[in-house]
Image (cartoon, helix red, strand yellow):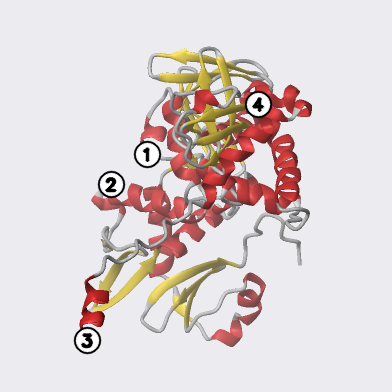
Amino acid sequence: MEEAEKREDAPQAAPPAEVDERAVLEKFLGALRANKAFEGERQFIRVVPRGLFVDERGVSAVVERYQGWILRESGGVAQKSVEKCQQWLFDTTAPERLYLVEGKNVLAGFLVPFPVKTPQQHGLPYYLGSLLSTSNYIHPADPQLQGIKNVELRSGPKGLEAVISRRRDSVVLPEQLLRSFFHLAAGSKFLQRRYPGIEASLPVCFKALVGLAVRAREVPRTFPMLVPFQTKASKASQVRVAGKFMFIEEKGRIFRVLELNGRHLSDLLRHEINNAPREKLGLFRLTPKHRDLMGFYEVAGRRTSVHARAFSEFSELIRRSREPREKMNGWHTSADCFEKFSSLYQLSQPIEKFKISGALERFGVQGDRFRINGGWIFVLSKEGTVMRTVAKHIRTVGARRR
């Protein structure tokens, strides 16, 4: 009994300290220093307090050295592919792109993360400053930006500016617009598919924005195009379009870019409608706080809501109409567009599905109730919400004649 009590009172052994698997990478620095074949690539690395910074031009060389090092350290047991080595080194399959700025010398690359107490004592190039993320900072000396044609980078009163040379003139793209476009890209599936990494990298975003701005073509005021109210009201505003992207500029500076597609188009229409004159809306009542429904009509105590997608589809289709009573003349606003939508819908009549099944199938649209006015079909849900709009008399882009 006494022996058992003594054993309980005896000091317990301390638990084994946790081993930081990443810390073994500090030994790898010694291997790089000793490897004479790596001399030429030293310019692409910097030992930093957070680990090893690798310039994007030196990634392949560092990964190759690491692959050989772990093979030797393990006695030939750890045979890892280049892809596995790169993933383990950077601790992710998609490392964050960073800047390392040494005066006028700017390196862009990635961090191999592990703790380094004294970066200057490893016999390798080192850097004791902070690394800058390209997700919230853009440097004019970024190598990715140097090869862009017809673009001059300069420092402006409010940050970086790009002067873009066009066929007959030039235009200034300010950093404020770039950051606005960066925010737009975060919610654009099209941009993310077309420009991988755009939602996490200002340089990628910059290249995409410049590319679109160079391709954009001027839209005369006589051309049927949905524009913001302030743009239509301003005599100094110019509009250019590249695909689904609209650029608004004044006095040689682009100050706004819009995506006329998907959720961004719906948001623009909603914002403009919320600020439209009351007489443009007629009996329609707005629900500005609702994410998807724009508002509703109420007749004899019965409500009919309008989904933002239905109006968005209408706004794209109406400008292609060649019917004299439907045709939009030149630049028009969301409120102008809604007047026509409201008039056409309120004069529509119920129709049975089998009578319009061909048009519904062609446009891939389903619904529970349907109303028709001329070539316009309004598709409603069971709850009485106008969910979709189909114009069987208007050819969409890419559609064939029947």
Q: Amino acid at mark 1?
A: Phe
Q: Amino acid at mark 3?
A: Met
Label 2, label 4: how many angstroms apart (C-alpha)?
54 Å
- Between disc 2 and disc 4, the foreground one is 4
**What number is the disc on residue 229?**
1
Instruction: Indicate whether 217 appears above or below 86.
Output: above
Judge the density around disc 1: few (<14), some (14-19), many (≥20) Cα neighbours within 10 Å. some
In the rendered image, which residue does mark 4 sit on?
A: 44
Instruction: Indicate whether 98 appears above or below 364.
Output: above
Q: Is label 1 in contact with label 2 (beta carbons under 8 Å)?
A: yes
Q: Is residue 127 left or right of residue 169?
A: left
**Where is residue 5, by image quadrant?**
bottom left
**Where is residue 209, by image quadrant?**
top right
**What number is the disc on residue 19?**
none
In the rendered image, which residue does mark 3 sit on?
A: 1
Label 1, label 4: how many angstroms apart (C-alpha)?
51 Å
Label 3, label 4: how many angstroms apart (C-alpha)?
68 Å
- Between disc 3 and disc 4, the foreground one is 3
Judge the density around disc 4: few (<14), some (14-19), many (≥20) Cα neighbours within 10 Å. some
Which one is in front, 336 or 100? 100
Q: Is residue 196 left or right of residue 173?
A: right
Whichever of callouts 2 and 3 sits on the residue coming sooner in the sequence is 3
Instruction: Tell me the quadrant of the picture where the C terminus can be found.
Output: bottom right
Label 1, label 2: how many angstroms apart (C-alpha)?
9 Å
Q: Is label 3 in contact with label 4 (beta carbons under 8 Å)?
A: no
Q: Residue at x 40, y 84 (%)?
A: 382
Q: Amino acid at mark 4?
A: Phe
Q: Secondary structure at mark 2?
A: loop
Q: Is label 1 in contact with label 4 (beta carbons under 8 Å)?
A: no
Residue 327 visible in image: no
Q: Position of residue 161 (x, y in %)?
A: 49, 19
- Between disc 1 and disc 4, the foreground one is 4
